[in-house]
Amino acid sequence: MLILNVIFIVVVIKPNNGIHNNLFTLTGFNNHYLQIISVCTSFTLSPIIDELFFRGLVISFLEKTRNSEFAIIFSAIIFGISHSLFNIIFLSFYIIVGILLGLAREKTNGIIAPIILRSMWDVFIVLMMWIY
């Protein structure tokens, strides 16, 4: 996921554009306070809510009627669409991340690992934007 994160930042963010401009690209907010709030919630609330829904509810529901591979891929596609706003670059990255998070849920048989991985993904994105 770390390598995928670096590729994501290199493709999406312009180098030396400044952290606030890069945060605008990522969050859509021009106001610095809204950018900070958006980043803070992406470290805490967003991973918990997203993972409980996509890896908890959606995968659990689909596994009752389908196999786990279908459930992981379907949940990853929905995850990608909901995070990409139909930007093809964002869509492809978030589908891959959704598959990796689904596999983490499957391997650990729980939701804590995907929540932690998702939080780390968000932290790495902000750190990479700051560095890049």
Image (cartoon, rainbow, N blue to C red):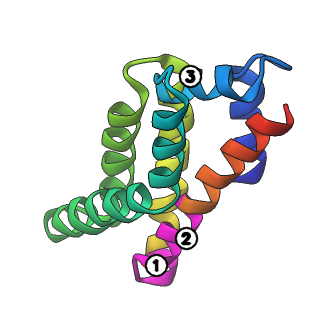
User: Considering only order in the chain, which callout, 2 or 3, is on the residue closer to the N terminus?
Assistant: 3
Amino acid found under the numbered disc labelled 3: Phe
According to the picture, the residue beneath numbered tag 3 turns out to be 24
Identify which residue, 70 or 29, lies in the foreground: 29
Residue 103 percent location from the top left of the image: 50, 65
Depicted 112 relative to depicted 61: above or below: below
Task: Name the front one of labels 3 and 1.
Answer: 3
Amino acid found under the numbered disc labelled 2: Ile
Point out which mark residue 11 bears.
Answer: none
Point out which mark residue 116 bears.
Answer: 2
Q: Residues within 10 Å of mark 2 (few under 14, many from 20)?
A: some
Q: Answer left or right for 12 relative to 99.
A: right
Q: Please say if the residues under marks 3 and 1 sit with CB atoms less than 8 Å apart.
A: no
Amino acid found under the numbered disc labelled 1: Ile
Point out which mark residue 112 bears.
Answer: 1
Q: Which residues are magenta?
A: 106-118
Cα separation between marks 3 and 1: 30 Å
Residue 62 percent location from the top left of the image: 19, 61
Residue 41 percent location from the top left of the image: 44, 53
Q: Is residue 28 magenta?
A: no
Residue 127 percent location from the top left of the image: 75, 46
Q: Residue furthest bottom?
A: 109
Cα separation between marks 3 and 2: 25 Å
Q: Please say if the residues under marks 1 and 2 sit with CB atoms less than 8 Å apart.
A: yes
